[in-house]
Amino acid sequence: MIKLKGFTSNIVHHDRQQDYNDNPIHTPIYNSVPYGYKKTQDLMDVFQGKATGQSYARQSTPTTDSLQSMITQAESGLDSLVFATGMGAISATFLSMLKQGDHLIASRYLFGNSYSLITTLENFGVEITLVDATDIQQVKAAKQDNTLMVFVETIANPGTQIVDLEAIGDWCEEQKLVYFVDNTMTSPYLFQPVRVKASLVINSLSKYFSGHGTVLGGAVTETGQYDWTNYPNIFEAYRKGDPSKWAMKQIKKKSLRDMGGSLSSDAAYQIAVGAETMALRMDRSCANALALAQMLDNHDKVEAVYYPGLAAHPQHDKASKLFKHYGSILSFDLKEGYDCAELLDAIEIIVNATHLGDNRTLALPMASTIFYEMGPENRAKAGISEQMIRCSIGIEDTEDLLEGFKQGLASL
Ligand SMILES: *Cc1c(COP(=O)(O)O)cnc(C)c1O
């Protein structure tokens, strides 16, 4: 494997280092479901893990293997597994690593579907405590005798809170807890959770990783930080050989093989092509988001702006220390009396849509869409104002974005 210094250099030179017939510089799309062997013994060795090789596309193909190795390199990890979606990767990890009677501490600033998934885990007898993970004292106070894992995201959506990533990592190490970090909002280009001692890292590949809003995928990465000999839930079959591989063997067999949320080779190929421009896209979209946040922050029709790049953001210093840029999610509250939908309709450059990490700027009002079901009281508790608009900033030219927002606000 060529090891270059830069993030993008490693991604764009990744595929040609593998040995494929005819030397393609992109990993080909392998659409065969079964893989055949001339000698039965060779197939038996693959099944028994004595030889590496493909057997059935639900577990892997050469195309998904190649994407996994690219993700591992981007995260400075040991190994990765890919799934059909980000939620597929998160649910696979929870379902194969937790059991009835275990306790999970989770940040209360979670992606809505991850929050919903956790409430389903409660039905299976997993105890959950949600905490304000920007405050390490609350995380520590939640520990019980049966706590096994802490789950957080890097930058929360839509409020852009940043949990105390470093302090939680130190504490998990000391307490021998698995530190499970969803890196979707930052991507490995802005931040590698292994730097704060994360044990397992999730990326939704549907967002910044692939970038174009045309493909779904998810990944879990083993960082090598956690000693799995301390973890009670590893099945006997996987407690063999190098302990740093135990968890991934278990997640691969118990969830990818048995639950089957597998990524197709077609999707893996598209994600790998998209990843080549992750850094370029994020440099641009994060710079756009910062420029827009500064403009909105000084606008008299805007009540509040939520963006880690603003000096007044409560975790601005942490974000500056840990992340390459401040992300491209930006939320703001319109002043009372102005109508969110009217503003969005007046800004031509905005697409009214949910989703994050597209090349186009997407925006939607929060209270009347994603958090509608929650009702006004619970919205207030979760810090979602009735006047909040979330924007996923794209790679358009900065001037067009600033102009569009300025004109839209002026028309109110
Ligand atoms: C979108 C998202 C997910 C889920 O990813 P999908 O690929 O859409 O399943 C998980 N976590 C975060 C933080 C996300 O933004």
Image (cartoon, rainbow, N blue to C red):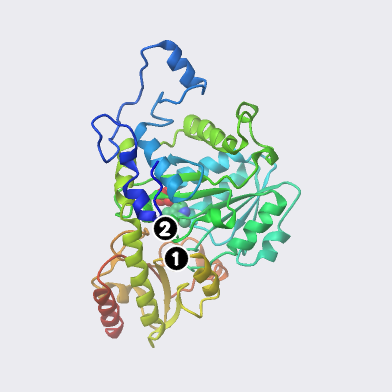
Do labels 1 and 2 touch, CB within 8 Å? yes
Label 1's element? Answer: loop
Q: Position of residue 267 (x, y in %)?
A: 32, 41
Residue 324, numbered circle: 1
Alpha carbon of mark 1 to alpha carbon of mark 2: how far?
7 Å
Residue 202 % position (x, y): 49, 49
Query: Which numbered tag is attached to residue 189?
Result: 2
Q: Amino acid at mark 2?
A: Tyr
Left or right, 61 with reference to 132: left
> Hey, which quadrant is residue 102 in on the image?
top right
In the image, residue 240 sits, relative to residue 328, either above or below, namely above
Whole-percent x and y of residue 230?
70, 41
Residue 322 point in image, percent of width and height: 52, 65
Could you tell me which residue is drawn at 49 percent across and 69 percent down? 159
Amino acid type, label 1: Lys
The answer to whether residue 388 shows anywhere in this view is: no
